[in-house]
Amino acid sequence: MEEPIEAQIELKNTTLLDSSHAALLLMGKRIDGLTVDGLRVDRALGHLIELRAEGSATLAGIDTAGVADPAVLTCAAFVLNWRGTTTGVASYGAHGC
């Protein structure tokens, strides 16, 4: 991405099974305006979220099982605003960036 993303991006009621990488990979220039509401991830070889961009997102209704540790890999200054119930997201880390 050559330009920052400043748009309303919505991911709703999504199930990801047996992902071969991170369930959500955010990379490139700054990303703002992402909303994730109702995401179920079961068995990802990577992390639940891999952050390789700056920006912010709002997440709600996240349910994970069998994702890599840490669940959230933070390689850039990215703000996650958690709302409501979330399961399986217990760890953040920067190891591997």
Image (spheres, rainbow, N blue to C red):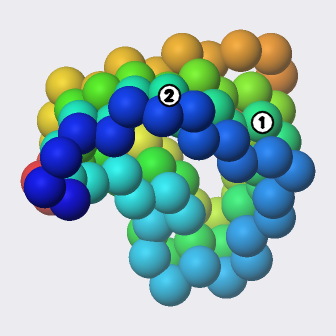
The picture places residue 83, in percent across and down from the top left corner, at 71, 15
Q: CA distance from mark 1 to mark 2?
A: 13 Å
Q: Does dot 1 land on a helix, a strand or a loop?
A: strand
Q: Amino acid at mark 2?
A: Gly
Q: Amino acid at mark 1?
A: Asp
Q: Which residue in the protein does label 1 denote?
A: 37
Q: Nearer the viewer, mark 1 or mark 2?
A: 2
**Residue 58 locus on image (x, y percent):** 59, 23
Q: Residues within 10 Å of mark 1 (few under 14, many from 20)?
A: some
Query: Toward the viewer: 97 or 39?
Result: 39
Q: Secondary structure at mark 2?
A: strand
**Which residue is drawn at the image coordinates 81% and 64% (left, top)?**
15
Using the rendered view, name the quadrant where residue 31 is placed. top left
Asked if residue 35 shows in the view, the reply is: yes
Residue 49 badge: none
Q: State the mark number for residue 33.
A: 2
Q: Nearer the viewer, residue 92 or 84?
A: 84
